[in-house]
Image: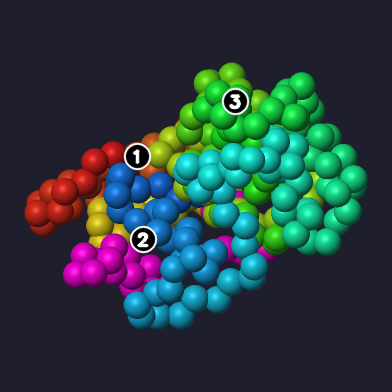
Amino acid sequence: MVRRLGALPVLDGIDLDVAPHEVVALVGPSGCGKSTLLELVCGLQQPDAGTLRVHPAALMPQRDLLLPWLSSRDNVALPLRLAGASRRAARAAAEELLERVELGRFARSRPDQLSGGMRQRVSFLRALATERDLLCLDEPFGALDAITREELRHWLVDRLRERPRSVLLVTHDVEEAALLGDRVVVLGPRPARVVAEVPVTAGRADGRHREATDAPVVDARRRIHAALHAAIAAGRAAGTEATA
């Protein structure tokens, strides 16, 4: 798959698949086209060349894009209402989700009354509230403090265990990619190509969350870092600007 912005090549020869119920984490240098790839998958952009086959997907963009005239509850409930749920049922489901991320008392607050981290959690819940089989999450925990970040990572894993779905996750955090991904896809500098795929063999069959000290996670993190550094060095040598 190829995508350009005017004369600027962004993606070049991307070949990527996501299996049912698989979590694929995308990492790569800043500006390499990770967010563009998610928008292509969600149908917000069209490729200039190549074939794209996807099921209907839900996107959580980097910016929360909450509707400012709606409360937290109604922002989370929005995809349920669009899917045909009654207002009462959608609001009840939204309130339950907000309670689970400790935002229940802010259910009636509007976005301008929330902190950046709170807004990001609401945006995250709105994406999860959809019934789409593919979730595209663009830096879903980027604005959160370390403790909340860890809690929401665990909560996402638990939620996917309850309601299995495929996930395409963009993150700049290599450790986060190794903790959440069944497979980590490493992209090179713009125009982005897949330079490595790192499977993470630590399973979740026993119901235990992965830990940063687990041997498969440590090994995956090392391999991801090595692939990133090699790709950035190759990009600089070729005259492509890239930053981690």
> How many badges with numbers are in the image?
3
Determine whether the residue tagged by mark 2 lies in a helix, strand or loop: strand
- Amino acid beneath label 2: Val
Q: In this view, does 89 lie to the left or right of 159?
A: right
Question: Are dots 1 and 2 in contact, CB under 8 Å?
Answer: no
Residue that label 1 marks:
225
* Mark identifier at residue 194: 2
Residue placed at 35% from the left, 77% from the top?
48
Viewer-side label of 3, 2: 3
**Relative to 128, residue 193 above or below:** below
Q: Which residues are drawn in magenta? A: 1-24
**Residue 202 x/y as whole percent:** 61, 41
What percent of the width, then of the height, locates residue 79?
Answer: 72, 54
In 3D space, how far apart are the residues under numbered discs 3 and 2 (Cα atoms)?
Answer: 38 Å
Q: Earlier in the sequence, mark 3 or mark 2?
A: 3
Q: Earlier in the sequence, mark 1 or mark 3?
A: 3
**Secondary structure under the numbered disc 3 in the rendered image:** loop
> Was residue 217 drawn as part of the magenta stretch in this picture?
no
Which of the pair 49/107 is nearer the observer? Answer: 107
Q: Nearer the viewer, residue 197 or 42?
A: 42
Q: Where is residue 146 in the image (x, y as percent from the top left)?
A: 53, 21
Q: Which label is found at residue 114?
A: 3
Where 20 sits versus 235, above or below?
below
Circle 1 crowding by C-alpha within 10 Å: few under 14, some 14–19, many from 20 = some
Residue 1 falls left or right of residue 237? right
Callout 3: 10 Å neighbours few (<14), some, many (20+)? some
